[in-house]
Amino acid sequence: MSALASSTGRARIGARTLRTDRWWLPPLMTFLGLMAFVVYGLVRTFMNQWYWVPEHNYLAPFFSPCLSEACVPGSSHFGQPFPDLGWLIPPPIFVLPFVLGFRLTCYYYRKAYYRAFWASPPACAVGEPHSRYTGETRFPLIMQNVHRYFFYAAMLVAAVLTYDTVIAFKGTDGGVGVGLGTLLMVVNVVLLWSYTLSCHSCRHLIGGRLNHFSKHPVRYWLWTKITWLNGKHMLLAWCSLASVALVDLYVMLVAAGAITDLRLFN
């Protein structure tokens, strides 16, 4: 005990890590996955076409809500308050900053891209290459502190996508119709709501600032459900990211005439 108490400083290890497993694989896969979504998102945004299927009321998630005068007829469900600003500022630019703001400031995504893109650190028990650490106290990382406000914007966007899904149940003859695109949109909004509600900010909003859960049984019940979802936040983050891209790609292919929507009825 005396020898341990008298020791000072940390062990001097020249190697960056003593781990012998493939610790570099998870951050590499995270980097490739996020980069694939970023590249697809940029191409899709500035493609600025094939996002509305009028016969089935399919609106691609990347273009919802479509609030610009540049939007094709029928795709603007909430009006067109913004002017057509040309190809440099396509319709998604007016909404994507709020959606990306929620994802970029998400606690899980921060861990993911800090490790995958900045190697800060790349994995547990692996030294990072940076000489100093300033945390999230300077611009732009200080913006991480506004995550709770992006949460409210994400709730609004999820509500809009839910509306898009509801109107996608309209059949070609004016009745009710269901196609493969409709089902994909349903899965997408379920995953988006699950990811959004599993957010740490939502958990705090539901159960925070309470001294006695026993005096607030409804909020306590909601808090337990949000806590259960919160435990799956990482899985929901990836599943919802993939579902957004998949639905957007499907709507694009149908709108471009590359494929025909598989109709289950009507």
Image (tube, grey):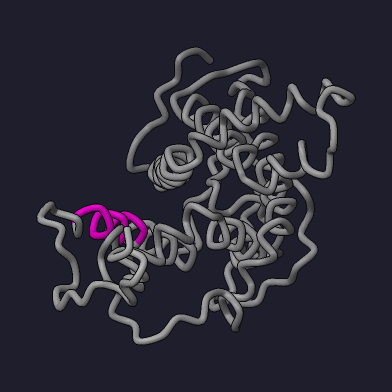
Q: Is residue 180 left or right of residue 97?
A: left
Q: Quadrant of the N terminus?
A: bottom left
Residue 255 in view: no
What residue is rendered at 27% in x and 61% in y?
125
Q: Position of residue 193 (x, y in %)?
A: 61, 36
What residue is rendered at 72% in x and 44% in y?
204
Task: Kindly report the secondary structure that dominates the magenta region of the rendered protein.
Answer: helix
Q: Position of residue 2 (x, y in %)?
A: 32, 63
Name which quarter of the figure residue 176 lies in: top right
Name which quarter of the figure residue 170 lies in: top right
> Which residue is at the front of the view, 201 or 266?
201
> Which residue is at the front of the view, 191 or 162?
191
Give the residue furthest to the right: 215
> Which residue is at the front of the view, 244 or 179?
244
Q: Position of residue 210 (x, y in %)?
A: 84, 38
Q: Position of residue 53 (x, y in %)?
A: 53, 40
Residue range (magenta): 25-34
Q: Is residue 208 left or right of residue 172?
A: right
Give the residue furthest to the front: 2
Give the residue furthest to the top: 265
Queried whether the magenta region covers residue 162, the answer comes back as no
Give the residue furthest to the bottom: 131
What residue is rendered at 77% in x and 26% in y?
220
Q: Is residue 254 above or below residue 127?
A: above
Q: Is residue 117 left or right of residue 244?
A: left
Residue 128 in view: yes
What residue is rendered at 73% in x and 47% in y?
156
Q: How many numbered discs, if any?
A: 0
